[in-house]
Image (tube, helix red, strand yellow):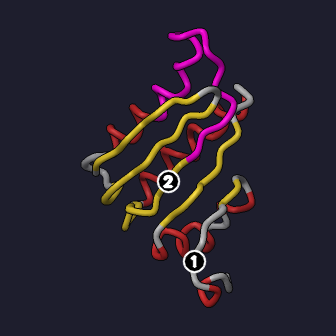
Amino acid sequence: MAHTLTFYDEVATLKIKGAITPINLFIFQNKLKEILNHSELTCKKISRLEIDLNECDYIHSVGIHKFLSYYHDFIKKDIEIEITDCSENVYKLLMIIKLNQLISININLPDDIYHY
């Protein structure tokens, strides 16, 4: 898994490439922690997290679990979360587990995969 984390104004953007697996989960976890701690370290408020999963081809269940375990922390800090793009396979997974009921998922995919 490779990643890019950028901060611009009040927006943190996390782009994931490759797969989120049990082996590299600590990298994903550290990035989530870094975003949560950014305000304390820099005195700049983060109000939005944009996650780009367009080049992420797989998320293991431990990755979903880790994200959900941090979800409450983001909400407590008034940080809105949005998935701005994701691969077709990841999109299908997110729809099956109904993650779209918790966070905004705004992506451009063919119409035929939206039926979940």
Q: How many marks?
A: 2
Looking at this view, name the residue that lies furthest to the left: 23
Residue furthest bottom as drawn: 112
Position of residue 12 measured from the top left corner of the image (x, y, whole percent): 55, 34
Q: Position of residue 30 (x, y in %)?
A: 39, 31
Residue 108: quarter of image: bottom right
Rendered position, 56 above or below 43: below
Q: Which SS class for mark 1?
A: loop
Residue 116 vertical placement versus 99 (above, below): below
Q: Amino acid at mark 1?
A: Leu
Vertical relation: 34 (above or below) 66: above
Location of residue 28 (image quadrant): top left
Please tell me which residue is depicted at 33% across the width and 38% down the height of the picture.
26
Residue tagged by mark 1? Answer: 109
Q: Is residue 58 left or right of residue 115?
A: left
The residue identified by callout 2 is: 52
Q: Secondary structure at mark 2?
A: strand
User: In the image, which residues are magenta?
Assistant: 32-50
Residue sitting farthest toward the front: 8
Residue at image location 66% in from the left, 82% down from the top: 114
Answer above or below: position of 28 versus 108. Answer: above
Using the numbered discs, state the Cα–Cα distance from disc 1 to disc 2 in whole angstroms: 14 Å
In-image side of 35 versus 111 (left or right)? left
